[in-house]
Image (spheres, helix red, strand yellow):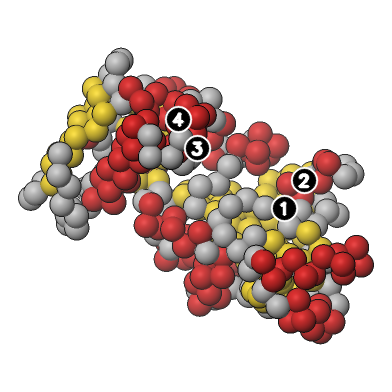
Amino acid sequence: MLILLWGLSGESPLTAVHAELNRLGIPTVLLDQRDILDTEIDLCVGKQIQGTIRSDNQTIDLSAVTAVYLRPYASRCLPQIAKAGVMSPPWRHAIAFDEALLSWLEMTPALVVNRPAAMAPNNSKPYQLLQIRELGFNVPETLITTDPGAVQDFWERHGSVIYKSVSGIRSQVSRLGSEHLGRLANVSWCPTQFQHYIPGTDYRVHVVDTEVFACEVISDADDYRYAAQYAAPAELRSCYLPSDIEARCRILAKALHLPVAGIDLRCTPSGEWYCFEVNPAPGFTYYQQATGQPISKAIAQLLVKGTCNQLTPCLTLVN
């Protein structure tokens, strides 16, 4: 058994899972992205996939890896890569390394939390919203547009509207107000997502394999993650979901091929449940620290279980 962690050392979720694996005494290697310029990867794909990652202080036989937990950032954005500039030798090395390792992650029979292909729909919130609706959850009525007139009509029809990013890049959810009237024309330059505001109580649900960790969020802010900037910080409470909603969360995560998922729900005063999005790389430590829920332990135990999926190579790489 060998578990591979990939990301930035010191990053909170990665550190929490690493600590749990160490506590369990499981052989684990951390591939720190900060060392990318001193790290090489070789892959050979045929009837089996073989590969090696080498750095100054370690050599990793990829065929020995039974599970992977990844929380990588775009290596091209690392300070040393950005400073070198686009198409520089360091930039080319970082891009090639990322592409090779991401390709291996799609093909390896090891358990990957979570595979890049499964995480990809998060890059298009509208597409992911369609998936969520097809799997049985209510979703807010949504408008994506570059037409200020369409925004005005949507706003007048619903009365209360929020806006947020269309992509997977984190953005602050805000409600439209009179102060935005003079800025609506700006949507002409950038497709923007608007949604009917749904009143109610927020819930963050972490699904780890078949385990469900639900957290009730007490906050009056439009986006509770930023509540402390404007008023009192959000209060997080461990809770239980209705059995049918809990089951639906498991179904949603499984259907999206996400062994670990962070699901954002809201329950209206009348008891209707809405799902806003599914995070395929949830920053669970924010909730774990507030509630004491053993999410990192559950992820570590999932990685220990590993898998022996049938290997089906779909890409040929040249060393």
Q: Secondary structure at mark 2?
A: helix
Sequence-first tag of 4 and 2? 4
Q: CA distance from mark 4 to mark 2?
A: 34 Å
The CA span between labels 2 and 3 is: 24 Å
In the image, residue 159 sits, relative to residue 89, either above or below, namely below
Residue drawn 44% across the image and 55% down it:
119
| Residue placed furthest toward the left | 47
Amino acid tagged 2: Tyr
Left or right of residue 108, residue 316 in this image: left
The amino acid type, in three-letter code, at marker 3 is Cys
Q: Which residue is mark 3?
A: 77
Q: Secondary structure at mark 1?
A: loop
Q: Quadrant of residue 266?
A: bottom right
Mark 2 or 1, closer to the camera: 1
Within 10 Å of disc 2 (Cα), the crowding (few <14, some 14-19, many 20+) is some
- In the rendered image, the vertical position of residue 254 relative to residue 9, given as above or below: below
Q: Indicate left or right for 7 with 181 as reference.
A: left
Which secondary structure lies at badge 3? helix
In terms of depth relative to the viewer, which is nearer, 231 or 96? 96
Classify 10 Å Cα crowding around label 3: few (below 14), some (14-19), many (20 and above): few
Question: Quadrant of residue 76 in the image?
Answer: top left
Q: Residue at x 44, y 58 (%)?
A: 120
Which of marks 3 and 1 precedes in the sequence? Answer: 3
Residue corresponding to mark 1: 172
